[in-house]
Image: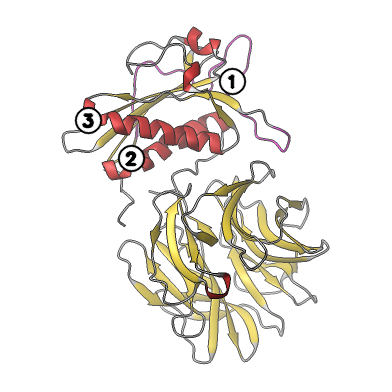
Amino acid sequence: MTGFMTLVAAVAAVMLGAAGPAAAQDSERGPLRIEITEGVIEPMPVAVPDFVAQGGAAQEWASRIARVVADDLSGTGLFREIPREAFISPITSFASPVQFADWKAINAQALISGAVEMDGNGGLVVKFRLYDVFAGQELGKGLRFAGTTQGWRRMAHKVADAVYSRITGEGPYFDSRVAFVAETGPKNDRQKRLAIMDYDGANMQYLTEGSSIVLAPRFSPDGQRILFTSYRSGFPRIYLLDTGSMQLRALEEQPGSMSFAPRFAPDGRTVVYSLTRGGNTDIYTLNIESGQTSRLTSSPSIETAPSFSPDGSRIVFESDRSGNQQLYVMPVDGGTPERISFGKGRYGTPVWSPRGDLVAFTKQSKGRFHIGVMRLDGSEERLLTASFLDEGPTWSPNGRVIMFTRETQGAGGQASLYSVDITGRNLKRVRTDTGASDPSWSPLLK
């Protein structure tokens, strides 16, 4: 797809000089590591000098890549970038020994050193090392990435992902995309178009032309297809878009019915969704290849917003069968649902964590909307946000961060995307060129 590059060379671990242990030690302190807990975390001071340009043609990319790496890390709330004005000795050669005393003097705990060069075909080669400053050793092995100049941001995200994972022990998530609904125009006549962007809001592209309302885009497990609901036929219908070929097709077209709230199964071949017929809304599954459908619920209540567990064995969904909206879990082939939400208020839009241990949800209570998480048995409910309208959570690929929609009140109210750590820390707005809603976080890009 235009604007997103495919790496010419896959991520390659290469020996870039003597590499220290993955968690370097020193006599006075433990490994260079951030322990992520629910308490207050003091951000780790990290130095990210401009990468060394190995050849004049690489100069503009060297600076840009270092800035994206620094922004990725700082944006987590776990790292604090040391201003470049504080640097004592700049890094002018990727091969030169690191002057650790100079970096200790400005209290840098981690140092990222990188270099960028152009290959013979006009592509970029990026390499980096991560250092534990107080231990005076390299942390892990250097990495080398190769790709096109159009994909420079992806290579920067990959560098940041490697640094983040080595220091936190968490899985990466920067090299990912977000599908969402881009909103323009007044609140009473708003144009809604399907769009896609990097996780940090860069490289936004429209995927639909805006002639009909679109809702709830959802990525496939391989990140190459998007399910969404559209009113292009006059009624809500589920469509499948291939983001490479831009081929679009309707998935569910039963006369006299409305289909919506689709999500992929982990196998990428099955879709779970809601279908309304004769005033009744139930949950169904659809085999994309054969078109065969199966009805999973049969109740006079409204059953919607289904989401698969990571292993594909269960489905969490919302239902008002108890009198108001609550969360339920059932086996993948249907059966008796088990209620998991019991707090005061209404619960909806549940989404299973990629780790399988939590469910994120929207909660409405006492006139406020919240994004929250709970265990699969309903225990340890934790509300992460509160506002006039927060809704529609989606998980980062590593299960550490949740993105959602926040809408302001009033006639001029507008929807925006926000993200928050599952500990409730680091709430921040995600920059977009337009109003934005209904985010769906992709898996890590290949």
Q: Earlier in the sequence, mark 3 or mark 1?
A: 1
Q: Earlier in the sequence, mark 2 or mark 3?
A: 3
Ranked by sequence position, the earlier of labels 2 and 1 is: 1
Res 89 quadrant in image = top left
Residue 40: name its quadrant: top right
Q: Which residues are magenta?
A: 12-40
Q: Position of residue 440 (x, y in %)?
A: 52, 59
Q: Which residue sits furthest left?
A: 120
Q: Residue at x 58, y 12 (%)?
A: 26
Amino acid carrying mark 3 in the image: Ala
Q: Which of the labelled discs sits on residue 57, or is there none?
A: 3
Q: How far apart, in angstroms, are the residues tagged by discs 2 and 1?
A: 31 Å
Q: Quadrant of the N terminus?
A: bottom left
Does the magenta run of residues contain 38? yes
* Residue 267 screen position, x and y as percent: 47, 62
Q: What's the CA distance linking mark 3 and mark 1?
A: 38 Å
- The residue drawn where x is 71% and y is 71% is 337
Q: Main secondary structure of the magenta part?
A: loop
Q: Given this view, does label 2 or label 3 mark the residue nearer the observer? A: 3
